[in-house]
Amino acid sequence: MPKFLLHQPDTIDFATRHSTGSTIPYAVWTSSLEDMPMIVPPPELRSTFDEIARQILDRIPDAYFQNRTLASLRDTLLPKLISGERRVKDAERMIGNKS
């Protein structure tokens, strides 16, 4: 099963409904996922898709951390700019120091 399918709501729902164990229903998914009906494309197509998807998925952590940094800068600078405590030139200097 391709890794990206493990995060799909339908996959999680199917596995949860067919898993064993009551304390942690996700603990025993192996046999339930083996029984999950799915259409499987030919190996060449899966390989091509995996190469393309991997390039996209590998970028997610970097984008996530960049987004957090930008949100932090926004939360720091915007109130100061709105209040007049800082001017745009001051903000540019502050950003230059953080990056």
Image (cartoon, helix red, strand yellow):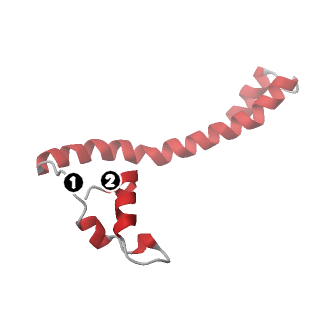
Near mark 1 (Cα within 10 A), the count class, few <14, some 14-19 or many ≥20, is: few
For the residue pair 64 and 27, the one nearer the viewer reads as: 27
Q: How many numbered discs sit on the rendered protein?
A: 2
In the image, taking residue 56 as reference, residue 95 lies left or right, namely right
Q: Which residue is at 39% across, 58% downward?
A: 13
Q: Secondary structure at mark 2?
A: helix
Considering the image in quadrants, where does the N terminus appear?
Answer: bottom left
Q: Position of residue 22 (x, y in %)?
A: 46, 77
Q: Secondary structure at mark 1?
A: loop
In the image, taking residue 96 as reference, residue 30 lies left or right, namely left
- Callout 1 amino acid: Met
- Residue receiving disc 1: 38
Q: Position of residue 47 (x, y in %)?
A: 18, 48
Q: Which residue is at 63% across, 41% downward?
A: 69
Mark carried by residue 63: none
Q: Which residue is at 76% across, 29% downward?
A: 78
- Callout 2 amino acid: Leu
Residues tagged 1 and 2 counted as in contact (Cβ below 8 A): yes
Mark carried by residue 5: 2
- Mark 1 and mark 2: Cα distance apart in space: 10 Å
Q: Is residue 24 above or below residue 60?
A: below
Using the rendered view, name the quadrant where residue 38 is placed.
bottom left
For the residue pair 34 and 20, the one nearer the viewer reads as: 20
Q: Is residue 95 above or below residue 84?
A: below
For the residue pair 13 and 50, the one nearer the viewer reads as: 13
